Amino acid sequence: MVQLATDADFASIVNEKENVIVKYYADWCGTCKLFAPKFRRLSEDERFSNISFIEINAEESPEARKLGGVNNLPFVATFTKGKLQEAYATGKEEAVMAMLEKL
């Protein structure tokens, strides 16, 4: 399951959960829309049941965007116990799988 977050709850989610992967998107981003079902499918994969999947609108949540170091969209970042681990601008499922396997 993918949880939608905003600046209001992003920091608490990232700090409370052991492992988190965040997909940053914008409503105008075509690649983000194409990547959304792949990200959702990964969130339902039993191998990653110990990881929290978060989506955040990068334009509406500048603080969360800053914490992830977002420089392009779609952008994916992983956090462990609130600390940023990896962060890339990617819409490729294989790249996200590799990030998940490191958590």
Image (spheres, rainbow, N blue to C red):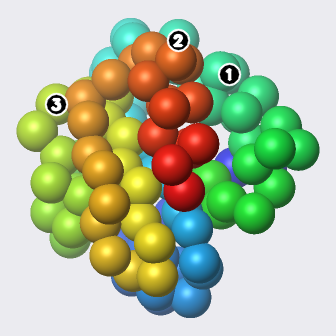
Q: Residues within 10 Å of mark 3 (few under 14, many from 20)?
A: few
The reply to whether residue 56 is visible in this rendering is no
Q: Secondary structure at mark 3?
A: loop
Question: Looking at this rendering, what residue extends furthest in the front direction?
Answer: 102
Q: Which sits in the foreground, 31 or 21?
A: 21
Question: Residue 46: image x %, image y %?
Answer: 88, 44
Label 2, label 1: how far apart the Cα atoms are: 7 Å
The correct choice, above or below, for 27 with respect to 100 in the image is: above
Label 2, label 3: how far apart the Cα atoms are: 15 Å
The correct choice, above or below, for 68 with respect to 9 in the image is: above
> The C terminus is located in which quarter?
bottom right
Q: Secondary structure at mark 2?
A: helix
Would residue 28 be found to the left or right of residue 79 on screen? left
Question: Residue 5: image x %, image y %?
Answer: 51, 64
Residue 72 is marked as 3
Query: The residue under label 1 is which amino acid type?
Result: Pro
Please give the residue where the numbered disc 1 appears in the rendered image. Answer: 37
The reply to whether residue 38 is visible in this rendering is yes
Question: Residue 47: image x %, image y %?
Answer: 81, 44
Q: Which sits in the foreground, 89 or 47?
A: 47
The correct choice, above or below, for 33 with respect to 59 in the image is: above
Question: Residue 73: image x %, image y %?
Answer: 26, 29
Q: Which sits in the foreground, 65 or 43?
A: 43
Q: Are marks 1 and 3 in contact (CB under 8 Å)?
A: no
Could you tell which of marks 1 and 3 lies nearer the N-terminus?
A: 1
Question: Looking at this rendering, what residue extends furthest in the right direction?
Answer: 46
Q: Are marks 2 and 1 in contact (CB under 8 Å)?
A: yes
Q: Residues within 10 Å of mark 2 (few under 14, many from 20)?
A: few
Query: The residue under label 3 is which amino acid type?
Result: Asn
Could you tell which of marks 2 and 3 lies nearer the N-terminus?
A: 2
Q: Number of labelled discs?
A: 3
Please give the residue where the numbered disc 2 appears in the rendered image. Answer: 34
